[in-house]
Amino acid sequence: TQLLEQSPQFLSIQEGENLTVYCNSSSVFSSLQWYRQEPGEGPVLLVTVVTGGEVKKLKRLTFQFGDARKDSSLHITAAQPGDTGLYLCAGGPPRGEYGNKLVFGAGTILRVKS
Amino acid sequence: NAGVTQTPKFQVLKTGQSMTLQCAQDMNHNSMYWYRQDPGMGLRLIYYSASEGTTDKGEVPNGYNVSRLNKREFSLRLESAAPSQTSVYFCASSQRDYSNQPQHFGDGTRLSIL
């Protein structure tokens, strides 16, 4: 069974600070997706990384996939109150395994105070 | 654009009652999924349908059944509800059942079982 561990579980920071959220596993994933979820809504995809070592940037958000495709990180620069939400990482099946079943981490609750 | 629509948004059941959660997508997607989200546990896959006419078990299928009614609709049924099934249920869809495909989520059904 593939497992994804996210850390920290909860993060409360001031506007303008930087932060990093981690997603780790002992399993190898074909891809890693990051979703953001707001209260009362479903998760919304932020990014998909598929190649070991890949780095993707989305404005102030930087996503990295580990070289061995077992871990990923999300770094936010100069956080804003609008970044507040639940951040979820999700791993795709191992290479060679068919399908789009995702394994989700437990999530990181981010609160950015103004 | 409606995307993925789930009904109802809220429901309270008594132990032993049955209920069907409805999900419909208007994006012409082939694959659909049912997840449950519990505090501290992220999202866990209950059942999925890779394409119209097929369904498969996910990580936590016990106590649930599904029906892929047509390409648009995928329902989740609780035959005899138990308090352990109190959760938020999310339906999602993706274009294909390929790894790396983004999943689009509905806004969830909040289900309480007394």
Image (cartoon, rainbow, N blue to C red):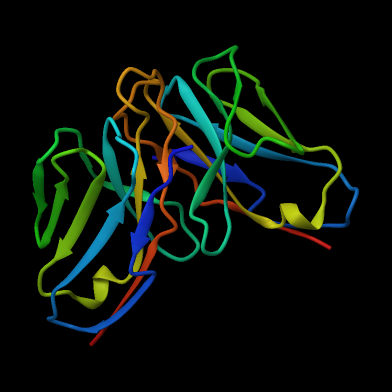
The vertical placement of B41 against A30, above or below, is below
The vertical placement of A11 against B105, above or below, is below
Residue B4 x, y percent position in the rendering:
48, 39
Taking the spot 10% from the left edge, 75% from the top edge, the residue there is A78
Residue B12 x, y percent position in the rendering:
78, 59
Residue farthest to the front, as pictured: A26
Residue A35 x, y percent position in the rendering:
33, 51
Let me know if residue B60 appears in the view.
yes
Horizontal relation, residue A8 to residue A81: left or right: right
Q: Quadrant of residue A37?
A: bottom left
Taking the spot 40% from the left edge, 60% from the top edge, the residue there is A107
Horizontal relation, residue A92 to residue A53: left or right: right
Horizontal relation, residue B111 to residue A7: left or right: right
Let me know if residue B110 appears in the view.
no
Residue farthest to the right, as pictured: B16
Q: Quadrant of residue B73?
A: top right
Taking the spot 89% from the left edge, 47% from the top edge, the residue there is B17
Q: Nearer the viewer, residue B46 or B70?
A: B46
Residue B21 x, y percent position in the rendering:
69, 41
Which quadrant: the C terminus of chain B?
A: bottom right
Which quadrant: the N terminus of chain B?
A: top left
Residue farthest to the top, as pictured: B53
Q: Nearer the viewer, residue A71 or B85?
A: A71
Taking the spot 15% from the left edge, 52% from the top edge, the residue there is A63
